Image (cartoon, rainbow, N blue to C red):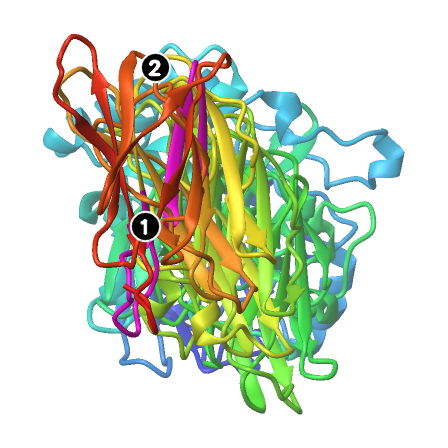
Amino acid sequence: MSAEVAIQKFSFPFSAAARLAPQDEVTQKGCVLVKALELRGLRESPVLSKLSPVLKKSQAPECPGPSPGAEMAAVQVLASQSAVLSGRSVFEKLIVEGEDQRPAAKRQLSCESAARTISVVKKSAVRKEAEEQRCLKPRAHLGQKAAPPPPPVAATGRRKRRKDLFTNSDVFHRLDAHVIRAGAELKEKCVHDVKTIVQRITQGSRNELDRLRAIWVWLCNNIEYDVSGYLGRSEKLSSPEEVIAAGRGVCCGYSNLCTEMCREVDIECQEVPGHSKGIGYRQGQSLKNVRSDHLWNTVLLGGQWFLLDACWGAGRVDVEHESFVKRFDDFYFLADPEEFIDSHFPDEEKWQLLETPIPLEEFERRVFKTSAFFTMGLRLIQPHHFHIVTDEGEANVSLGFSRPTTFTYEITQHQDLLHCGTSEQKDSSNSSFGLMTVNHRSMKLQLLPPASGTYDVKVFARPEAAVTPLTWVCSFAVECQTPRAMEEIPENPFLSWGLQPAAGSLGITGSSQGSEVAEVEGVFELVLKTSRPLMLLCELVHPELEAAVAKRCLATQIQPDALTCHVLCPLRGFYRLSVFVRDYEKTEVKFQNAANILLHSKGKGVEPDELFPPNLGSVCGPGTRTSEAGLSKFSHTMALVSTQQGKCNITFHNQRDLELHTVLSREEKKAAALPLSRHLFCTYTDSKVTVSVSLPDAGVYRLGLYAKTAPGGDFNPMCDFVLRNSCDQPGPPFPCVYSAWRKGCVLFEPRVGLLEPLSWVRFRVRVPGAHRVSVVGETRTDLKLNKSRVWEGEVSSGNGLQQLKLAASLGESSDMAVLMTFDIKQLGGEV
């Protein structure tokens, strides 16, 4: 009985023509889906069984690399049993002509594919058969038993996961190296035969998994995505021989070749058509009634189906440069269905391989996650769908992680395409429209869009110990209806707020401030606990604060087990306080960012005259440096010293008997009557040092302590103290001290260096080794030595025409050395 062929034109923009012998030629118009040997009444035909396997498709989907986005069409033909039988010798060739939105591209199928049997059905029959095929077993290849369809997980118990097959890809190290080496040799010899290639690359494989791995690695390393063909600028290649010879192909080329190669080693492999979130994909677009755009594979291992996509595993398409970027992505080799479903949605629900399949609408709403999201062990805490609407101008994203991870993000104006040519890697964050904080278990991103509109948000991550750029892991779309009215947040180029994930490895064990915003009233103190001695540098940034002024807003103290940063906020608004550390001893090592604190100063800021003194050193207060120098037991252990009387004494012990020097300074606005050195007086007895300060005015001063740590060397800075004086009454100066005033000398009276005229002044002083001590003015007065080894006596100050000099004869010399001088107030004024 002659065949009765019905041709139905479908809605797809694609056509296929099957050219038969003249007596049986049938011209097909429209797009049809290929089916063969599955029609009722044909399954038992012994002739047809010999023609298996049949041609599944005459036109496969076209999608680029790991980010497929081209359109796919398929062909389905129906013929009667007699037509199929009589046509065995005439199906020598199948020509598919694409009528896509891009320029037409023709291709010739291989002889093997052309020899497959084709059947044609009406469109109504296709719909009916589509439901029936869900229950049918996959077609068997010649000489193979039919593989079972993917059964429900509940029927088979716990489904095996990828990690049940192999712990990690390192187990394939030798196999992968062999395949890459063999592939290069075969390419050099221009070997294009599938069977020969498969035999060579699987040589020595121990089991089915090894053979499949060899095929996968060969595909990913020897076939590039055909960008030119995808763009319609050249002929698209799909047959195995053509793809191998050219070394390129679109997604159907990868999937078809994978199927053919698996057949050679008796691995049941099927092609799976469906949708993918690749090039050309728009987040949120409806895929209902939209033709599929991608092809991947499913393989049967140990009685269970697994998923793989060699097209996405080989690399990615650089849209901007219209090129293919080779990048082996091992994630798509036997990916777990629960992760694969985030980017691949099969036409047939059964190939989701999920216990509870998801509908297409859920696939459309799901957050897009790259393979790096899963390989880093990240998990999505919130939100569960990619589209977020701000609440009072704010939207939140949160990810969890099991291993220390570094994060950053990028927020830009919305673009239609998910893959729009932007970088998939990033070194830092340059956005001031969000606050990213990372603790030891999770990352939280608080997004604050600056204006109404829709924004794209990309999250990047990398393992904490890695030094490579951060990799794109997931994407969101944020719709802001009403932005929050707020002050500008300074940019944070150091990835996240709070302690950095790497802070622990840098030696920081804790912080007095968490990752939340610190509300301050002009003054803030940050204390970081450390596990070892560290050096510290800080940076303070405000959108309107000059760098020179910002330096005068910081005072840092470095101790063996703690780092302290004192911060002044002269302006309202947000500040970024960034902390950098390195090991104390490793001077050759660069400072690394350890923490970034966001400060918000709402109240009145500090006044300009309240800022820290200029030229303040990086080491304030006692700490690691003073301890190393043998200076200990400080009476004031903090860097900031406040006085309400304008006077204070700072004491400490000089265990190594170092030569010391002190300096007092401040921001000078006008010329002072006396130098500030006259308001500083040092006393050194035994190992104890006392630095006395008498400040001339209210304000902020710097007290610098220096020491010679090596004989004959220079004075090195030990530490600075910040003295804050709130007393308006001027403190009197000390006497002017000379070098003869040495260790052991003590001035008991008078303690002031400016004396009243025409008065008697009592002098009491201890000068070790002196055999004569005198006060010389208008006259000379010798002091007497009492039982306590203190020289004392009453001295007339005179009329102020001359200074009083305290002198002593030391050692064997009879000469008198000046120890210090005292000024006398002039009648009616001061000197």
Instruction: Answer with left or right where residue 681 lies relative to residue 104.
Output: right
Disc sitting over residue 786 in the figure: none
Near-viewer residue (138 or 808): 808
Near-viewer residue (798 or 40): 798
Q: Quadrant of residue 597?
A: bottom right
Q: Is residue 800 magenta?
A: no
Tag 2: Cα neighbours inside 10 Å, few (<14), some, or many (≥20)? some
| Quadrant including the C terminus | bottom left
| Quadrant including the N terminus | bottom right
Q: Nearer the viewer, mark 2 or mark 1?
A: 2
Number of marks drawn: 2
Residue located 66% across and 74% down the image: 387
- The amino acid type found where label 1 is placed reads Arg
* Residue 24 picture location, percent across and down: 42, 68
* Residue 168 picture location, percent across and down: 53, 23
- The amino acid type found where label 2 is placed reads Pro
Spatial CA span between label 2 and label 1: 24 Å
Residue named by callout 1? 678
Tag 1: Cα neighbours inside 10 Å, few (<14), some, or many (≥20)? many
Q: Can residue 534 be seen in the rendering of this structure?
A: yes
Q: Can residue 110 be seen in the rendering of this structure?
A: no
* Residue 266 picture location, percent across and down: 51, 25
Near-viewer residue (261 or 218): 218
Residue named by callout 2? 768
- Vertical order, 608 against 262 (above or below): below
Which residue range is magenta in the image? 663-691
Q: Quadrant of residue 547?
A: bottom left
